[in-house]
Image: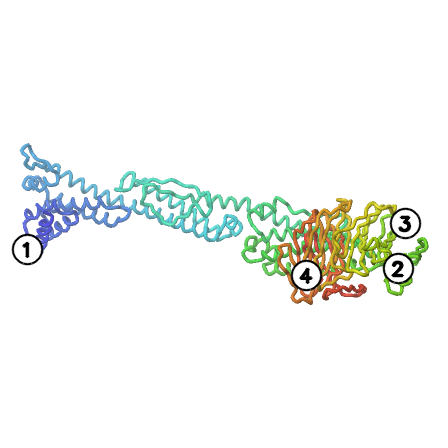
Amino acid sequence: MRIVTLFLLFILTTSLSAQHLRYKDIFPLFPEMGNQELKNTLKEYISTDPNHAHANFRLAMAYEKSYKAADVLTNPQYVLANAQQAKLRFFKAKLVVDDKEVDRNNEYYFQTFKISDSKGKPAVPFGVVQKKILNGLDSADICLQRVPPIYSSFTKSVKHYDKAVKIFATINSTYVTLNDLYLYYNQDTEKQLNELQLNYDSAKSYFDDYLALVSSYPIPDHHQSYRIKPIVTYRLDGLITSLNFLTDKIEFWDYTSWAQEIQHFINGDIRSLRRRLMEEEDKLDQSLTKIDHSNGEGIVPVKLDKQLAYTLNNFDRQSLTLSLLDYKAYKQEWMLKRKSFTPDTVVSYRNAENYSALIYFDRKADTLAQVIKSRLNQDKFRKHADFLNKYYGSLTGLQGYLAKEKTEIDNSYKNYGAQLEKEIVGLIIPPPIKPEENKILKVGKWNIPNNVVEPSQELIDKGDPLPLKKLKTVDGGYYLAGIYKADKKIANLSSFLVKVNPDGKPAWIKNFENKIDSLSKVPDANNFIASVELTKEGCAVVLQSAGTSTAVKLNTFYYFNDKGEPKLKIKLKDTGYPRQLSYLEKSNSFVLVLKGNEEKNNASVNEPITIIGLNILGELQWKRSVELTGSFTEWVNLTTGSMLVGNYSLLKDHNDQELRTKSAAESNPFLVMMNSQGDISRIIPLAVPESVRVFKVVKVNDTSINLIGRKEADSSEIKAISADEKLVHLMVSQDGQVIYSNL
């Protein structure tokens, strides 16, 4: 049926353009036509019969159907055009449709109104048709009046909200965090926030107007309402990728409240923060000026306001401004420390301790200055541009200030490092022997020099005791340990240990003439006191007995009380050469370091350094080993453990990884960090630019362990230090960090 109808329509359309058809011929086809088809057919017909009553009425109805069915919000022009045509056709129908027309052509109107008499015959009253015409005119008029303001309010709301969304998105892309927004806030940001509020308020106002209009003139397919959502999480809330105002439930992000909160916070907390920063800077500058123009006495440094620092750090992570305040707050202490120290006129541990502390002050000042430098860029400067411009002029001015401070720090660091080195070297070089000390100590048949002598074969052959070690006690007494030739006819050497009272008189003497073979009738060993250590009760020694006809070596541990009474004598299993014996008062125990087979350090042979822990009874508590080709320098006791210092050309670290110098002929220092149980926690090779051999360690305190050496390869020979010699000086902390280096 549909195909037949379409075919007839095609014929009608063709016929209408060719000749005038009668209305009654096309009327039966209307029910099968779509509304647009119907409008086209009627317009074509009316073009040939403009005063046809029902054709005008029916075309008005078609236009009315079109504008009432169309979407006012998406196609307002179509709505208004059809409403205008409906108005014109209804007006025409009003002129040409009367009661006679309706009576005469009632079957035409029946198709629209479906009113018939009792017999089913069309009986549409004229009054019904007339009412429809008048209502159609009124409806079209109302549509033409109401739709433009509805559409205008709606589109203005969408336009302003779209602008608000884009402004908010721009703010979010410009400022990664709220803190950035707070600190980069300027006149442009203020303008953005004002525009954001204006557009949001306009969007909401226009939408309220729109809802008021559609409440009195409802539009098809749209029953809208909205709710306001607060912006709680920055960069998560309020961002919209696709704007849609055609849904029934619309959400407005509350941009105005958010913008007002930001502005309120800027005008309150941030303004207060900036004011407090300037007040803090003024206080610090005044204090620094006061210290600079005084000797520092009685001046209490200004403490950086902790609450201010905390607040600033919360807003400005890795803050350039906070790093400047930190530096200036610390600089007060640094300046006061420098001004308060007056060095002793003679070499002293006090001087060394103070110079070490000053180097730490320099290091911390340098660290704080480096923090400033790491943050010195345009972005961080802009966060506090007003503050920094006021006190430093510009970014370039701040760079100049930092360069000046860095020069002062570097000069101070070099100066105190040189002064510390001078003190350390002074502590190493033995003081001149006083005339009253350069006397002979009469002990039985022996005449013993009162000071250490350099042994020679000639002196040894004389048979007189030769002191090689001298250890002073806290009460003014001392111990002498050395060698002698018991029988001039044989080459064997023996050792002695003598205690001298504070009054200069000998208290007791011990002789060591041990044999490798206890049954031998003649001496078969050389006996050397390799290590001596004072304790709170007396003195401990490790004696090495080296066979003269065999390669056998024995180490014996002796412990004497203050009266010379033997407390302990134990043969040790380890036969390496005893390099250092140390007494640990805290644990009442000993640490012994051994390396190699003879007194001279052989740095070219791969041989371990052995460290053993002995309790007060001489019992082995622990044993550790460090594999290397190199030499042992010194073992240092620390509060939290200990440190061993040496030199290497090849070294195995705590992970059993081999470390080598650039060439086998070179030497580099290393540290072995140990805890109080003797466990090795780290083996640290010290980075040096060339071959360096450390031959002396001076512990000032746990934070100042000074390594003295020369730029040379390792060897068994250690030359005496000359006063004007250029030495290598490294100061390390208890955790092995290099605090100062003159390299």
Separation of residues labelled 1 and 3 (CA atoms): 154 Å
Separation of residues labelled 2 and 4 (CA atoms): 61 Å
Taking the image as shown, residue 6 lies to the left or right of residue 378, namely left
Q: Residue at x 83, y 53 (%)?
A: 518
In front: label 2 or label 3: 2
Whether tag 1 and tag 3 are in contact, CB under 8 A, the answer is: no
Residue matched to label 2: 485
User: Mark 1 is on which residue type?
Assistant: Gln
Whether tag 4 and tag 1 are in contact, CB under 8 A, the answer is: no
Looking at the picture, does residue 397 appear above or below residue 135? below
Residue matched to label 4: 407
First-in-chain label (4 vs 1) = 1
User: Is residue 379 among the parts visible in the rendering?
Assistant: yes
First-in-chain label (1 vs 3) = 1
Residue 198, horizontal then vertical, whole percent: 42, 47
Residue matched to label 1: 19
User: Is residue 293 among the parts visible in the rendering?
Assistant: no
Out of 541 and 478, give the one closest to the viewer: 541
